[in-house]
Image (spheres, rainbow, N blue to C red):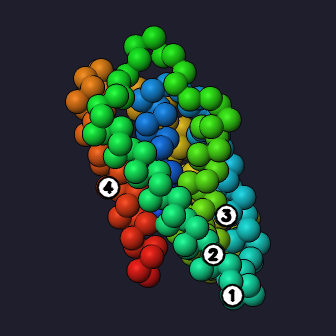
Amino acid sequence: MTSFVPGFLLSLSLILAIGAQNAFVLRQGLRRSHVFWVCLTCAVCDALLIAAGVAGFGALSEALPWFEPVMRYGGAAFLMWYGWQNARSAWRGTSALDAGGQETQSLRAAVGTVLALTWLNPHVYLDTVVLIGSISSQYPDRLMFGIGATLASFVFFFALGYGARLLAPLFANPRAWRVLDAIIALTMWAIALKLLFL
């Protein structure tokens, strides 16, 4: 437990910050659209990255100097585009919560978006591979530290995805969707600008 609990708490504290991935999971949860697969994809991707960090692959950016700038600019471009999609939706006011729970996006598109939001975001590598990986070396049982960090990811994403339903009455109003879309757009653009001007 001396390694498991710190791993769990560190991972949870890193993942709580509002970011592209969390915003997308929240949106899918509100729409009740492919929630299980979106949450599972996020958690499994995190688990792979945490495992890589704990296993000692945090030096990837040092071994491949081109890796960091490619991920940074590619991620910024994707986030700008994704933010534009949300900004356009906020402007048009076309989003609304379908009370019948009808799917509005294919499973392939939803999982593809999650994969892009995860793997094209350099902060994910910094938080999971580098930070969690380096901190895990300070604990006697790195495996338990990694298991704790991974469990935190699963708990968080499934709580966010399925807990979003509690907000469903609020998002029955199209105006609330416009506000959410605008907030997501601004968040995506802020992250993209941060990536461009590191």
Identify the residue at horizontal 37%, vertical 22% (top origin).
97
Q: Nearer the viewer, mark 3 or mark 2?
A: 2
Count of marks overlaid on the render: 4
- Crowding at label 1, few (<14), some or many (≥20) Cα neighbours within 10 Å? few
Give the vertical position of 102 relative to 34 (above or below): above
193 displayed left or right of 64: left
In 3D space, how far apart are the residues under numbered discs 3 and 1 (Cα atoms)? 21 Å
Residue at which label 1 appears: 65
Instruction: Find residue 148 and report its image quarter.
Output: bottom right
In 3D space, how far apart are the residues under numbered discs 3 and 2 (Cα atoms)? 21 Å
- The percent coordinates of residue 9 (x first, y second) are 49, 60
Identify the residue at horizontal 23%, vertical 30% (top origin).
175
What is the quadrant of the C terminus in the image? bottom left
Q: Secondary structure at mark 1?
A: loop
Disc with the residue nearer the chain's start (2 vs 4): 2
Residue at which label 3 appears: 50
In the depicted view, which residue is nearer to us: 157 or 20?
Answer: 20
Q: Is residue 162 visible?
A: yes
